[in-house]
Amino acid sequence: MEKSITELKAIIKAKFEAKIKKIQNEMEDALLFLSRLEETLGEETSIESKHLDKTIFSKESIRHVKVKRKWRKIGDKTAKERVMAALQETNAEFSTGQLKEKVNNDGSGKEIKRGTFAGIFADLIKEEKIIVVQERKGSQAGLYIKAN
């Protein structure tokens, strides 16, 4: 019986040593790959930094062009028309969330997405159709009223 236990120990030891060797080889391969990647990225960074001031994206070559927005029609009215209609119905102070909810619950089309609504709302503030009573502070919503 003792001989079979020592044989079992030897078999188990051989199996685990093979597994350990395999894992060590995988680790060495991964480290070798990482060092090659690091060398490649280092070369690219040095090449980019040498030519950075001569690129087409240098500060002198960037032009800013103002683009007029075209609002998609959502249902029968455009998104801006729907926001204006909801604004006309509002008589008290409101937050952006309350106005957006009122627009989306008007029953005249699909939901106006947050990005679309934010652009329209910003334009209305810029056109002075909405007056800022209290600006947004962190997670606290801002308060607005419509201009007369």
Image (cartoon, rainbow, N blue to C red):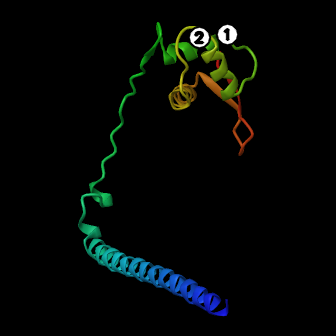
Label 1 amino acid? Answer: Glu
The reply to whether dot 1 and dot 2 touch (C-beta < 8 Å) is: yes
> Residue pushed farthest front?
1
Q: Nearer the viewer, residue 141 or 93?
A: 141
Q: What SS does tag 1 mark? A: helix
Residue 2 numbered tag: none
Q: Which residue is mark 1?
A: 89
**Horizontal side, residue 22 vs residue 133: left or right:** left
Q: Which of the 4 quarters of the picture holds residue 47?
A: bottom left
Instruction: Determine if residue 146 is in view.
Output: no
Instruction: Determine if residue 108 is in view.
Output: yes
**Horizontal side, residue 130 vs residue 139: left or right:** left
| Above or below, 34 relative to 64 | below
Q: What SS does tag 2 mark? A: helix
| Above or below, 38 relative to 73 | below
Q: Nearer the viewer, residue 4 or 48?
A: 4
x, y (%) of residue 33? 36, 77
| Above or below, 37 relative to 65 | below
Q: Residues within 10 Å of mark 2 (few under 14, many from 20)?
A: some
Image quadrant where one finds the C terminus:
top right
Q: Residues within 10 Å of mark 1 (few under 14, many from 20)?
A: few
Task: For marks 1 and 2, give the CA distance.
Answer: 7 Å
Label 2 amino acid? Answer: Ala
Q: Which residue is mark 2?
A: 85
x, y (%) of residue 130? 62, 24
